Amino acid sequence: MTTDSATTGPAAVTFRHEPALARYTLLIDGETVGFADYEVEGQEVLFTHVEVDPARRGQRLAGILVEQALDDVRVRTDLTVVPVCPYVVSWIDAHAEYQDLLTRGR
């Protein structure tokens, strides 16, 4: 398991990769506030679902979670990203600097 932490204001934000669960998790002050599920199929990583606690929506946490997950995939693997979750599709569409992940390895 890899963990990266950053503090923004009084809250401690932690990003965690949990490979045994095929999940990236976002925690604030130790409380899980969001997760991104994925599946690895051959040379592809499929992002299947992103969810943020409804009480925490509107804080751009889903975007932070997706960005951190994609950064981790970029650094740790050479897998091609396949966005299945509609949120991940729209996030990558809006962030041209991540679109290379859709075609690498092909």
Image (cartoon, rainbow, N blue to C red):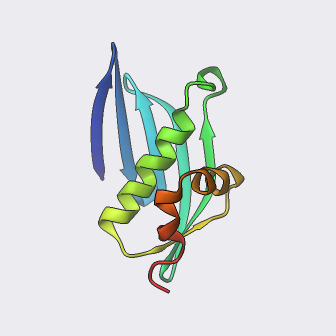
- Count of numbered labels shown in the rendering: 0
**Between 88 and 5, the one nearer to me in the picture:** 88
Classify residue 62 as left or right of residue 27: right
Q: Can residue 22 be seen by looking at this rendering?
A: no
Q: Measuring 48% from the left and 53% from the top, which residue is drawn there?
A: 23
Q: Can residue 9 be seen by looking at this rendering?
A: yes
Classify residue 65 as left or right of residue 90: left
Q: Give the image location of residue 94, x and y in percent.
A: 60, 51
Q: Give the image location of residue 32, x and y in percent.
A: 48, 32
Q: Please say if 17 is above or below 57.
A: below
Q: Give the image location of residue 37, x and y in percent.
A: 56, 54
Classify residue 41 as left or right of residue 105: right
Classify residue 68 as left or right of residue 87: left
Q: Measuring 44% from the left and 83% from the top, which residue is drawn there?
A: 105
Q: Measuring 52% from the left and 33% from the top, which residue is drawn there?
A: 61
Q: Please say if 10 is above or below 72.
A: above
Q: Residue furthest right?
A: 86
